[in-house]
Image: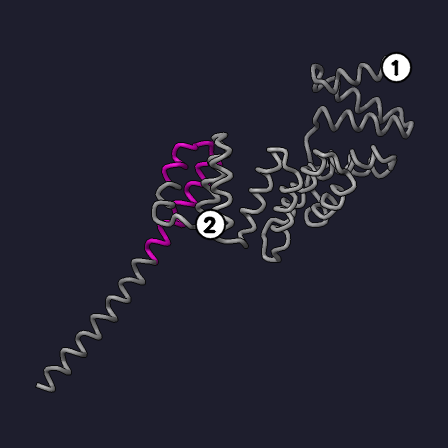
């Protein structure tokens, strides 16, 4: 009888171990499904397929409603669909679940900035940048600077642009903004350096060419001024920048 009881006890313990292993395996499979569907949703969102992205991210959230990254991607999707209240809700869920989700902080900051909530947005960018493991700090610095320019607050924005360029010297938007800030603050030679660096890594835009015209005009570099003006008129004849150039030419 004792031997039988011992056998039963050992069998029960083995079944318990097996159940525990099965539960772990089931949990791992569930987590993998959530990760895969979240990644697929992000890819389809980037490819302009929001309907497919919604299908995948809904599957992920059905299995894990509190998953931070899944909520982050759903927030981006709702933002794309212009469902701003829903986007805000999902961003908050993402950060409530994982306050250290720096990607969500950066995305939420961009969302808030678009809504005109500059101070709140910059706080979100700062939270992303406070994470030493955050993988794209140059983008968060650029976002913070661009957002501050909406105020406008060029002095505060400049520190973010400089940090973005320290991390990635070829950030086109940061180079253009630094050229603009330098020109507006009377640092014309610095402005020339930044706009020349911009043209080395970026295609011509009407705004950048007009700024280059103004910079070279301020420096009395007539040949360079004329060259930039010719590019602006030739490439973007109907742009607002070209119209402003015509007004500048008429007054000179």
Q: Position of residue 40 (x, y in %)?
A: 41, 42
Mark 1 lies on residue? 251
Most common SS among magenta residues: helix
Residue name at image x 51 percent, y 39 percent: 88
Inspect this view and state whether residue 112 appears: yes
Residue name at image x 59 percent, y 53 percent: 134
Q: Relative to 10, is 116 above or below?
A: above
Q: Nearer the viewer, residue 214 or 235?
A: 214
Mark 2 lies on residue? 68
Q: Position of residue 118 (x, y in %)?
A: 66, 38
Camera-side mark, 1 or 2: 2
Q: Nearer the viewer, residue 54 or 36?
A: 54
> Is 66 a magenta residue?
no
* 48 sits to left or right of 6: right
The stretch in magenta equals 28-56
Q: Position of residue 119 (x, y in %)?
A: 67, 41
* 84 sits to left or right of 246: left
């Amino acid at each position: 009888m004792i031997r039988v009881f011992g056998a039963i006890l050992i069998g029960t313990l083995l079944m318990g171990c097996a159940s525990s292993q099965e539960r772990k395996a089931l949990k791992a499979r569930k987590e993998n499904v959530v990760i895969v569907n979240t990644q697929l949703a992000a890819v389809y969102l980037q490819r302009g397929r929001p309907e497919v992205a919604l299908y995948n991210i809904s599957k992920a959230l059905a299995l894990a409603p509190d998953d931070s990254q899944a909520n982050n991607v759903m927030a981006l999707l709702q933002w794309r669909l212009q469902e701003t209240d829903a986007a805000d809700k999902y961003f908050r869920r993402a950060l409530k679940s994982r306050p250290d989700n720096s990607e969500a902080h950066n995305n939420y900051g961009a969302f808030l900035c678009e809504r005109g909530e500059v101070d709140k947005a910059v706080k979100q960018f700062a939270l992303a940048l406070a994470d030493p493991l955050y993988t794209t700090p140059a983008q968060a610095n650029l976002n913070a600077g661009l957002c501050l320019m909406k105020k406008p607050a060029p002095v505060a924005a400049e520190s973010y642009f400089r940090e973005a360029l320290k991390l990635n010297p070829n950030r086109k938007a940061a180079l253009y903004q630094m050229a603009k800030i330098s020109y507006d603050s009377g640092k014309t030679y610095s402005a020339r350096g930044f706009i020349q660096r911009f043209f080395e890594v970026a295609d011509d835009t009407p705004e950048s060419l007009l700024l280059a015209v103004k910079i070279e005009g301020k420096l009395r570099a007539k040949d360079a001024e004329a060259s930039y003006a010719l590019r602006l008129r030739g490439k973007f004849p109907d742009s607002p920048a070209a119209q402003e150039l015509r007004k500048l030419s008429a007054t000179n």
